Amino acid sequence: MFTKHWLLCGALLAGCGPAAFSAHSRDNNVGDVQKALSISKAPARGPRNGTGKPMAFAVTAGPDKMVVGIDLASRGVVWKFPADVRSRIVVGKGLVAYRLGDHELVGRDPASGRELFKVSLPANEQFMGMAIDDDHLYYVVQSTGESKRVSYTVGLDHSGHEAWRTPAPGTLGAPAARGGLVAVPFAYQNLVLLDGASGKEVGRVRNTDEQVTFVVGLPDGFFYGGGKGIYLLDDKSASGTRAGSSYAEVKMTSGQMRPTYWFDGYQPTQSDYSAFDRNRLLWRGVKSAGGVGFESDLAVLHSFRYLFGIDTKSGALRWAYANPRTDVVGTEDVGDAIAYATADGEIGALDEATGQSHPLATTGLRIAGVTIDADGIVVPQGSADSAPAALRASLEQIVWDPDARFTVIKIFATEALGRLPGLDTTEALLKIVRAPTGVPVQVQRRAGEALVARKDAGAVKLYADALATHSDFLTDKHAVGVDIIARAAAGIDAKSLAPAIASHLADPETPQPSLKDLVVALGTLGGKDASRALRTFLLTYRADPIFLQDPSPLVAAGNALLTMGPEERRSVSFVAEERRTLPPVAESLKAALAVPAKGAPRATKKQP
Amino acid sequence: MKRLLLAALLLSSASAHADDVATLRRDLQVASDARADEAAKQLAASKDPKAIEAILDLLALGIPPRQAQVLLGGLAGRKDARSFDVLVVFSHNRNSDLRRRAIELLGQLPDAKVVPSLMLALSDSTPEVRAAAAEALGHRKERSAERKLMQLLEHRDQSAPAALAAIATPELAHKLAERIGPIPDALLCETFGEILRRVDFGPDPVRVEIVKTLAKIPGDVSTTALIEYMQATEHDPKRPSRLEAESVVNHRKGT
C-alpha cells in the first residue's frame, strides 16, 4: 500500500513536470516556444473594449480623482466615477480594470462604467502590473512580508473570480497577455510563458545578452526587451541571444534622447500613469522577412508636449508635432495614427505619415493619465507635399518654445533642423544663433555647429545681413553669434564678407571668446581687408594684458599674417621680437617664424 | 669733491639726454617697465615737434594700455590732424578708458571727418564713452547728432541733456516738449533748463514756450530749472520769459 502510494505520487509528478517559475524548468526550447505560441490567438483588429467603438479611459488630476469613459465616436464623456486610480487602466473585451487605492482591483463595463467586480489585494503584496485578454485579467503581485521574496501571477475571469494563482520564487515583472497566453518577465533574464486558462508554465525564454524588463502583447505578437530594442517572441527567441533572435531597434541619430521602448515591468511606480507615459517611444512591431521590424518603418518619440516621427531605419525625422501650451499626458500607437490626450482634456490623433493633428474629443477634463483604445482609427491624411516645410516650422516652434523645461528636446529639434536641406533652414538656424535671448545657450551652440557644417553657399547674403548688425546701445541691438557666422562664411569661402568680419574684430563689443574664430575666418578668407584688420588687431593688443590669460586670438592673427605675404611677415617678426609683446604671444610667433615661409629659399648655414 | 662734481655733471647730461625724443621712444620700447612709464610721461609732456610723431608711432605699433593712456594724454590740446587715424583705432579699443580718451581727443580735432566716430561712440555700451561723445558733439554744435542724442535721452542717459541743449533749435525744443511722459521728467527739465540758459538761444517767445512747458511738469525738478533760469537772467529782469518763469515759481510757492 505504502509503495503504491509513492508510485502514484511519482507518476503524478512525472506528468506535471517542474512547477511554474521553477529554477529547474527547461528554457530556450524551440518546441516549448512553438507550443506556447500556438495557444496565443491573434486579436481582431480594432478597439478591444467590445463596444465596437473607439474609447479612451482617463484618470483626472487633482484631489477628487475620477475615472472617466470617453466615447471617441460620439466625442463625449459617457461615464465617470470618483476613483483613486493607482494603476494604468487596462482594456479588454467588455472589461476595463484598474487598481483602486493600494489594495483593490476594480473591473467595470467599458460601455456603461458599471462596476463588475472588486477584488482585494492583501496589504503585504506589492502590485507590479496587470494585463487583459478576451477571457481573463492577469495581475502580478510581489509579497513584501516574507523573508524570501515570493511573487504571484493571478488569473481572474471577467467576473472577478480567481481562476488560478501561480507562485514564483523571486521577482516578476508586469505581465502581458495575448489571446490566451500570458508572458511574465522573471528574474530579469527570463520571459516565462503561462497558459492563460490554467496558469501553468508552457515555455520559457532566457536571454543571455541583456535584461528583459518588459513584455507587451500586440496584434503581431508578443514583444519583449530591455533598454535598447525589441525582440519578437518567436522560434528564434529560443536562441537566447540578440543576434539569434528576431530583434530590431530604432536608429537614433541624436544622443540627446534615450528612447524608452516600454514601461519597466520591474518598477512598481511604472504600473501607474507617470512621467514615463510622457517620455517614451511609440511603435508597432511587425513580423518581417525572417525577423521583426517596425510598422511603416516608423517610431514616434513622445516627450512631454512634443512628438517626433522617426524613420526607424535612417533615423531621419519625418515630422514633428508640438502641442500648444500643455503636456501630452498619454499616447497610443493605434495603427495608422498616434492617438493622444493632453493635460487639458483634448484627445486627438496624428496622421502617422505627416504628423498632422486631428481632434477626436474635447472633454474639458484635467487628465492625469489615459489609456486610449482606438486601434484602427482613421484620420484624414495630410498632404505629403508640405511635409518638409511643416517639419521645419514645427521644429522651429519647438526651439522657440518659451517653456524653459525642455532644453534637451530643443537640442534634439535643433539637430533635426540642421539635417533639413534648403536656405530656409539655414535662415532658421541663423535666427537661433543670433538670438540675444529666449534660446538656451546649448541650443544656440548646436545650431551654430549645424550652420557651420552645412556649408550653404547660397547663404552669403544672409550672412552679410547678419554681420551688418553691430551691438548698439541706442537701438538695443545685440550682435550675437558673429563668431559662428564668421566660421560659416569661411566654410563657404565667402571672401566678400571679410570686411564685415573685420569690422566685428575691431568692435569692442565683440565678446573676447569670439575673437579667435573671427581671426581664423579672416585668415582663411584672406585679402587686403583681412590682412589689414589682422595686423591692426595684433599690433593694438600685442602688449595688452587682457590677452595674457588667453593669447590664442593674437597668436592666430600672427599665424594667419605669416601666410599673407612678406610685408605681413615683417609685422609678425616685429611683434615677435619687440620687448613689450606679451611673452606667450612672442614665443609662439618666434616658433612660427622659425618655420620657413612657403616658397621661401631654404636658409643655408654660413661657413665660419 | 672733484669726483662729486663730475658725477653731478654726468647725471645732468643724462637727464638732458633723456629728454631726447629718440631716447624716450627707445626707452618705451626696450627699457624696464618703470623706466618706460617714466619715458611715456616725458614724451607726453615734451614740447619737441618730433614728439607727436613718436607718440603716434608708438600708439600705432602697440604698447601696454597704461602707457597708451599717458601718450594719448600727450595729444590733448595739440589738435593735430595727423592723430586722426590712430585715434579712430583707439576709439574702438577694448579698454573703455582708452576709448573714452580717444573720443575726447577726436572731439578736439576741427576736421568734420571725426563726426562719424563721435556719432558711433554714442552707441557705446560704456556710459563714460557715450558721455565723451555727447559732450564733444554738443561742443561742436553738431546738429546732425540730434536724432541720436534724442535716442540717448530716451535711454535715460545722463549725458544727453547738456549735449541736446547745446545743439537745440526752437524746433528741437518743440519736439522735446512733445516727449513729456516717455522721457523722465528730471532729464527733460535738465535739458530745458540748459536750453534756457543758453545765451544764443531764442527768440524769447520760444523761451516763454519752454517756460510754459516746464510749468506743465510738476515737482521740484521743473521748479529748480525755472529758478536757475531766473538766477541766470537777473541782469534782464523784464525779459518776458523770465517774468513767466517768476510767475510760475511764485504760483508754486503760493505767493
Image: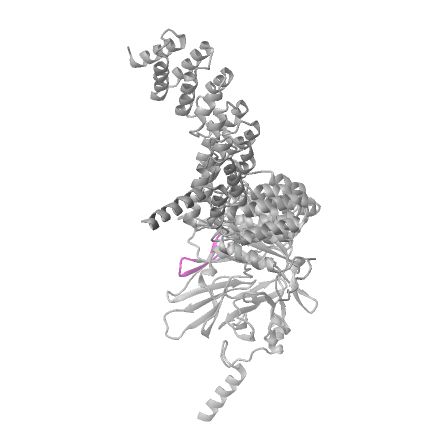
- Horizontally, is B123 left or right of A393 in the view? left
Can residue A110 be seen in the rendering of this structure? no
**In the rendered image, which quarter contains the N terminus of chain A?**
bottom left
Which of A156/B171 is in front?
Answer: B171
Q: How many marks?
A: 0
Identify which residue is drawn at 44% across, 55% down: A85
Q: Residue furthest front?
A: B2
Foreground: A110 or A597?
A597
Quarter occupied by residue A34 = bottom right
Q: Which residues are magenta?
A: A100-115
Drawn side of residue A165 relative to residue A318, left or right: left
Percent across and percent down for residue A383 are 69, 45
Looking at the figure, which quarter contains the C terminus of chain A? Answer: bottom right
When the figure is inspected, residue B36 is found, relative to residue B50, above or below; the finding is below
User: Which sits in the foreground, B214 or A159?
Assistant: B214
Residue B159: percent from the left, percent from the top?
44, 29
Residue A433 higher or lower than B127, as above or below:
below
The answer to whether residue A531 is visible is yes
Residue drawn 49% across the image and 46% down it? B63
Query: Any magenta on residue A108?
Result: yes
Asked whether B181 or A389 is in front, the reply is B181
Question: x, y (%) of residue A257?
Answer: 55, 57
Residue B30 placement (x, y as % from top left): 48, 50
Farthest left residue in view: B255
Scheme of colours in the image: one colour
Relative to A425, is A123 above or below?
Answer: below
